[in-house]
Image (tube, grey):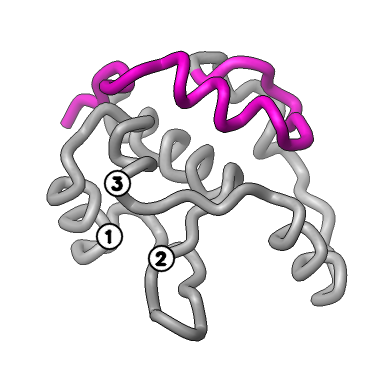
Amino acid sequence: MKVGKPCGDRHKIQEFFSGFPTLPFTNLDSPLTGLYSTPKQKSMAEVEKDRRVSPVLTSEQVANILGVSKRTLKNWLRSGKIPEPARNQKNNYREWNLADIETARHILRGMND
């Protein structure tokens, strides 16, 4: 299974991310070097704070970033190929943050090697 380039308008995606704090990578196509070495354990308060600061994306936006259809993304979630993101407690929608997207990319790149 091969992950393609993001579809849709790249400028809209970059504009969306421009207002949020940056992670160790600066570009959506950058390699994931060093991101998964030795993660520090965070307290629940720190995790909640990070979730509030991180942008929340829809499954459709994440599918566009990964370069696949929304149906393919949901099939990967259902089959367990990538982990489920947190869900909104009010409407049960998936709430993707940047860490969820990078985790999915890391897993999918590993499958392509």
Mark 2 or 1 closer to N-term? 1
State the residue lying farthest toward the bottom: 90
Where residue 77 appears, x then y in whole percent?
27, 60
Quarter of the image for residue 34 reads top right
Magenta stretch contains residue 16: yes
Above or below: residue 81 compared with residue 11:
below
* Residue located beneath label 2 in the image: 94
The residues colored magenta run 1-28
Query: Secondary structure beneath disc 2?
Result: strand
Identity, as a three-letter code, of the amino acid under mark 2: Arg
Query: Secondary structure beneath disc 3?
Result: helix
Where residue 13 appears, x then y in whole percent?
47, 26
Where residue 9 appears, x then y in whole percent?
35, 18
Marks 2, 1: nearer the viewer = 2
Mark 3 or 2 closer to N-term? 3
Magenta stretch contains residue 4: yes
Query: Secondary structure beneath disc 1?
Result: helix
> Which numbered disc covers residue 77?
1
- Residue drawn at point x = 49 percent, y = 15 percent: 29
- Residue drawn at point x = 51 percent, y = 84 percent: 89
Identity, as a three-letter code, of the amino acid under mark 3: Glu
* Residue located beneath label 3 in the image: 60
Quote the CA–CA distance across marks 3 and 1: 13 Å
Quote the CA–CA distance across marks 3 and 2: 10 Å
Quadrant location, the N terminus: top left
Residues at discs 2 and 1 in contact (Cβ within 8 Å): yes
Mark 3 or 1 closer to N-term? 3
